Amino acid sequence: MKKPHQKIALLAAAAVVGTNIFMSGSVTADKSANVGKKSSEIAVTAKSDYGSYEEAIAQLMQQGVISGYSDGKMKPHQNIKRAEFAKMLVLGLKLESNKDDIQLEDVKQADWYYKYVDTVAELGVMKSEDGKFKPNSNITHAEMAEAIAKGLQRDVMSIRSWMDGYSADQFATRGDALQLLATSQKSIRSESAKMTNIRSLNKVTMEVTFNQPLTQENESLEAGMSHFVFDNGLKLVNQPRLKTGSFSTYILPTTTQTPGTTYTLNYRDSQSLKVEASDELIRTNEARQVDKDSFEIEVLKSDGVVDYGYMISVYSGGRGSNAMILDENNTNNGQQYQIVPSLRSRNVMITPEGGEPMTAHYLPFTQSTDGNQEPKFRLANGAKLKPGVKYTVTSDWLTLKNPAFVAKEAASVQINSVAQVDASHLNVTLSQDPGDEIFVQREVKLTGSDGSEAKAQYTVQSRKGATGTFVMQNEAKLTTGVTYTVQPIGDWAVSPEALTLQRSSSLNPILFLSLPKSVNSHRE
């Protein structure tokens, strides 16, 4: 089997037209007996065993996705085989592959399921192991959810939430598969999706629902900025994000809305909806110092406020127990939540007692690191927090229970070592794990033995414990045979002796020169 394609072609139509019938193993089905029939036309003898699956069966029969066995029965309580499910996926989600080069020991071109297995295997929608697909093996609920998630380009958590009685290791019945597939068709992505509703959740957050989810391309930052256009000066500040568990509802982060204003959102110059601005501020708990020039604002789920990173589809897989599903009223387990959207390009004001207000900028990717909702902000233009001075944080988009803190003397973190990764990257290791993202937007200077100078900046979300990866700026490269000394730019860190980095021709990481253990690396 060749490497599966990353791009999955999905057509938007919920109705899938076809004449292929559903086969099970060696049992031959009637090729046309039930195709196109309505639920009321299904034989009573066959229908009597459908129970809660009746609507899903009728839907998929009408589409030509299934037609049953030669006796007209669907056998919804029978375990479904992997080959059977592959066919349902291909027809029900309209999956396509241009390849025909399957190389599996247990799947032959003469097999009725060959082209369906070929498609799901090529697209990586269903797995094969050790060169075998195991077409006649049963499929579990977990495997079924994973396959549909890949077919829809969605998160598994959402798919599981659409399943009644989900049990990971339990074998799925044909009825389970039919029910889930019929439900999942609501989430087939569409290039021609239309808005059906919009509302403002708070001063910086909109929620918009479509009749079908957008294509992944149309969910991108570039497309979002181009396609979602407000009037009255309101703008999108980051891309739309699909809510976990929803079929087609998106969170839109906006610039600060003006209370009393009616905004019009124009989507792709083809559709407009009006929405009233919200005057609701984001509820936060307290502001507190992080280091010499930065502070954080604590947001608590216990206060009914949740960061969008915990409840959007794209992040659900990496959020562990923090991942959650909010319903159409943004409630979970009876608790209604206020949503903190992306804080990209967001600022707050910080005012020293008796002094003038200063602007502090949000530090990217710090909203919910290390399992905490504590977005970080940094003073502009190299300003520093003065020890012993009381500072108060204010904003036109959030409110704080405890907005003030007294700055303390903050020791610079200590760079303990530097190691080369490749010609463009180096790993900077501190003497201890700083927690959260103290590295964000920090830089180091490299001075080469050949007289060259260059800068490297921290790569967001690259921190692993005490080590963060820095990338060379302005397309600079490390030169073979040149010895570099590395020093922090600014006083965010200390290195009382210049750290030395040597690049090798093999591009293997070069070890570092350790700093004296006497250097104080404590950070308050």
Image: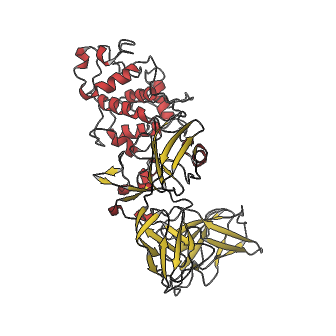
Q: Nearer the viewer, residue 259 or 448?
A: 259
The picture places residue 209, in percent across and down from the top left corner, at 45, 41
Q: Is residue 24 visible?
A: no
455 versus 73 height, above or below? below
Residue 502 occupies quadrant = bottom right
Q: Nearer the viewer, residue 472 or 14?
A: 14
Image coordinates for residue 236, horizontal then vertical, percent: 56, 51
Q: Residue at x 57, y 52 (%)?
A: 235
134 vs 238, nearest the viewer? 238
Query: Is 508 above or below relative to 147?
Result: below
Q: Quarter of the image holding residue 424? A: bottom right
Residue with the most extreme right position: 451
Q: In the picture provided, is 428 more to the left or to the right than 188?
A: right
Q: Is residue 275 left or right of residue 143?
A: right
Question: Residue pushed farthest front?
Answer: 260
What residue appears at the point 40 percent right and 34 percent down from the top-left corner? 184
Residue 95 seen anywhere in this rendered image of the structure? yes
Please state which of residues 470 and 450 is positioned toward the viewer in this rendering.
470
Image color mode: secondary structure
Which residue sits at x=76%, y=72%? 452
